[in-house]
Amino acid sequence: MADTNVEDLPLEQIAELDSAYWFDHGCPPTVRNVVEHCRLMHAADLRYPIVVDPDGRVMDGMHRVARALLEGQPSVRAKRLPRLAAPDFRDCHPDDLPY
């Protein structure tokens, strides 16, 4: 049975494509870091849908999005969550989390 919650999401609707995404949290876009992301894009399996929040923001699967873009595809398969659970923590540094 096909998953009815999966949609074809046009790449033009993914706002993260025009953001620093991987390189805006202290990870500099060095040649090594860019090449590592290229490896991850190449290994990404487009058979699996990405996960987006109710507003269409990518929660999982940006390497699949990048591969689809690189291959000239107009869209990517996506599972859109109908709602988000409340976060366990807010406004804290990741190093301060208890796990």
Image (cartoon, rainbow, N blue to C red):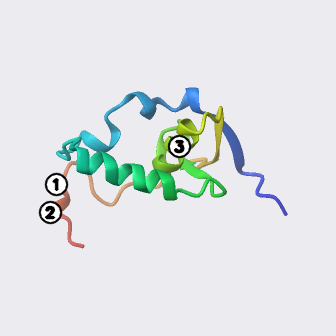
- SS state under label 3: helix
Q: Which residue is mark 2?
A: 96
Between marks 3 and 2 in the image, the one whose residue lies nearer the viewer? 3
Q: Which residue is mark 1?
A: 93
- Which quadrant would residue 73 be assigned to in this image? top right
Crowding at dot 3, Cα within 10 Å, few <14 / some 14-19 / many 20+, comes out as many
Between marks 3 and 1 in the image, the one whose residue lies nearer the viewer? 3
Mark 3 / mark 1, whichever is N-terminal: 3
Mark 3 / mark 2, whichever is N-terminal: 3
Crowding at dot 1, Cα within 10 Å, few <14 / some 14-19 / many 20+, comes out as few
Crowding at dot 2, Cα within 10 Å, few <14 / some 14-19 / many 20+, comes out as few
Measure how far apart labels 3 and 2 are at the Cα level. Answer: 31 Å
For the point 53% across and 45% down, which residue is it? Answer: 67
For the point 40% across and 49% down, which residue is it? Answer: 38
Residue 3 is situated, as x and y percent measured from the top left of the image, at: 76, 57
Residue 88 is situated, as x and y percent measured from the top left of the image, at: 33, 60
Amino acid on which the number 2 mark rests in the picture:
Asp
Label pair 1/2, CB-CB below 8 angstroms: yes
Q: Which residue is mark 3?
A: 65
Amino acid on which the number 3 mark rests in the picture:
Val
